[in-house]
Each structure stands twice: as C-alpha cells, then as structure tokens.
Amino acid sequence: MSSTSSPENATIRTDVLIVGAGPVGLFAAFEAGVIGLTCHLVDALEVQGGQCIELYPDKPIFDIPAIPVCTARELVERLTEQCRPFDPPQHLGHRVTTLESHGDDKRWRVSTDKGLVFDTAAVLLAAGNGAFVPQRIALESAAALEGRHIHYAVRETAAFAGQRVIVAGGGDSALDWALALRNIAKRVTLVHRRETFRAANASVEEAKRAAADDELDIVIGTIAALNADGGVLKSVDIKQIGGEVVIDADHVIALYGLVAELGPIAHWGIETLAGRVAVDTSNYESSRPGIFAVGDIAVYPNKQKLILSGFHEASLALRKAYTYAFPEKKRTHIHSSYDQKLSERILGADAKKDLAADE
C-alpha cells in the first residue's frame, strides 16, 4: 500500500474516504476494492496499524478467524498484504478536521489539518476510539520545550547521537527505544514509575541485562520537573519514594502511550453516545446519510469491541456506501470464489487459466 500526498490545493475524488488505518480500516480498504469502490485512507498517526501498533505491537491476538494466534504487528502486516492488489493510497499523519456536504449529488467534502481535501461519496469512520494523540508530560514547562528537547516519538535516531537522553515509559515502545539508543546516545536513562514493565518479557530481560552491564540506567520514579536555562533543557528531577534525584539530560522522549479523543468528528452533526458514533446495525450508517462508523468508534446495543466485529461492520457499511457512489447501479452479489475479475486482480493473469481448467 502506498503512502502518498496530494498536490497543493488539489481535491482528491474518491468513492469512499476511510478515516483510520488500523486493522478495521485496512480490512475496509480491501473490501472496498472487492466490491469495486475506490478509497483513500487517512490516519492521524504517522504509521499504519492504529492502536495495535502504537500500544501493543507484540501482544498475541487469539480471536481472528482461521489464525490461531498472531501478534498485532503480524495482523497489520497480513492485512496490508491483503490490500496490496488494490493499492489504496494512505495519507498518514493527517487528521480529519472539517466535513461539509456539497453539490446536488449529495457528496461530501472532507479536509485535513495539513491541507488535503477529499471529494467523496461516503465516509467510513474506522478511527478506533477516535484520533489518538500522545499522552504528554503533565508539566507547564513541557510545552515550551516540545519539538526541541521534549519528544513524543522518535523520527530520526541521529538527532540523539552523543546526547544525554531520558526515555520515560514502561511499555514496548519505551523499552525498544531505550535499547536502540543506548549505542547512539551519550547516555540513556529509562524512567518508569514502577519496577514492573508492560513490555515483552524479552525486552524487559534485555533492558535489565543492559543496565547490569552499564549500557543504560533504569530509574524508578516519575518526572517532577524539567530544568531549563534559556529554553535549553539541562536536567530533569525524578520523584522517587523517599525523595528526588536529578538526572542531567539534553532530551526527554516520553512514551506514555496514546489517549483517544473524538476530536473534530464530534462537531460533524452526527449523533454520538458516550463519545462514540451511534449507528444503524443494518448498515452501520450514522445519523447523517453517507457517514458510517465501524470498529470501536461505533456504538449500538450489545456492541462487542472486537476486531472481528469491526470486519463484519465494515463489510456491511461498504455495501450501503456503494449505493451512494453508484446510485444508478444495482450491485449483484458474487461469492469471491466465483468472481473471475477479483481472482485475476488478486492472483494475477494466471488465475483466469486456472479457473478455466477447474471448470
């Protein structure tokens, strides 16, 4: 799947705009291709995979049909491969902001915070619990240092070469980056509020071995103060049981995970309930025709917040979305096993010969 952008001021026309590139959004992109809809994906995160990749990439998942067990990362990789024949464009690091109807054909115009504009027949919200944003350091002094000394993601490891770095957090991302930077930074200190970590056992053991070999430091406590001089970070106060310790630092990488917020979607005139989008379970359409919600962002009686539920919801939603993209057509259902055009698209030109041989 391609990550792409649009020329400045150009409007991107598509049948469906999928908001969210997590597992449900990725499967929706595949389903859109199956039934003959063009689609684009937009996600506020810089990488595809949604909260699966950001929060628990190596966590085992046991309830995906026909896959006894896989990690969240593996699931995203398989879904990406499944989408590949249709190559739906992805616009990562873009947050949807405005929605407005336009024209007599009842299409939608959707804009992002970075200037992309989409002209679409339908919008499929697959944004999990909403847009995910980093959980920030809860100190007033942090905002002024963000981007230069305070970071909530690692973009280029070279930026930390020869620097004193504090990595704050206890999950997979925090441990992975602390370990990755130990041979790049001048000194790495991993700060976590408790002695137990929420990361893969192998990473925890490796971090402890690295600390024992003096390759990095592990400090138990919480960030209490950021000490800067002239807008330049000098040190960080760490609050511990029984006192505080001061650690010299040039950078803090805070990897506390993500927090969800409905964001601008809350102002789109869609009926919501407890911060989620209310839908009709016959087609997972919201209170505004042409706007659908699937996955964790959708709410209805007896809602089950499962990935497999999101797959089902996306399939039905897209079939209703088809009627908005092609109001003059009546779509005939064909089982994928008998869909020759689909087989050729996914399997290649040889599929036609194979199908003919089987008949």
Image (tube, rainbow, N blue to C red):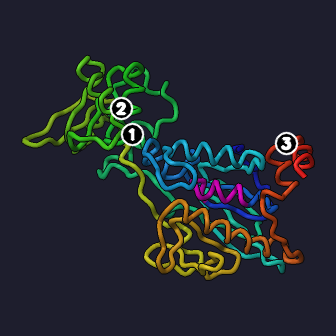
The quarter in which the N terminus is drawn is top right
Residue 204 vs 313, above or below: the answer is above
Residue on which the image places disc 1: 172
Whether residues under marks 1 and 3 lie with C-beta atoms below 8 angstroms apart, the answer is no
Earlier-in-chain disc, 1 versus 2:
1
Q: 337 above or below 48? A: below
Q: Amino acid at mark 1?
A: Asp
Q: Which residue is mark 2?
A: 203
Q: Which residue sits at x=48%, y=44%?
A: 71
Q: Which portion, as a residue range, is magenta?
A: 20-31
Based on the picture, tell me whether residue 22 belongs to the magenta stretch: yes
Q: Name the residue carrying label 3.
A: 348
Q: Residue sitting at 53 percent across and 54 percent down?
A: 64
Q: Splitting the image into 4 quarters, where does residue 99 fall?
A: bottom right
Q: Amino acid at mark 2?
A: Ser
Left-right relation of 354 to 8: right
Tags 1 and 2 touching, CB below 8 Å: yes
Q: CA distance from mark 3 to mark 2?
A: 41 Å
Q: Earlier in the sequence, mark 1 or mark 3?
A: 1
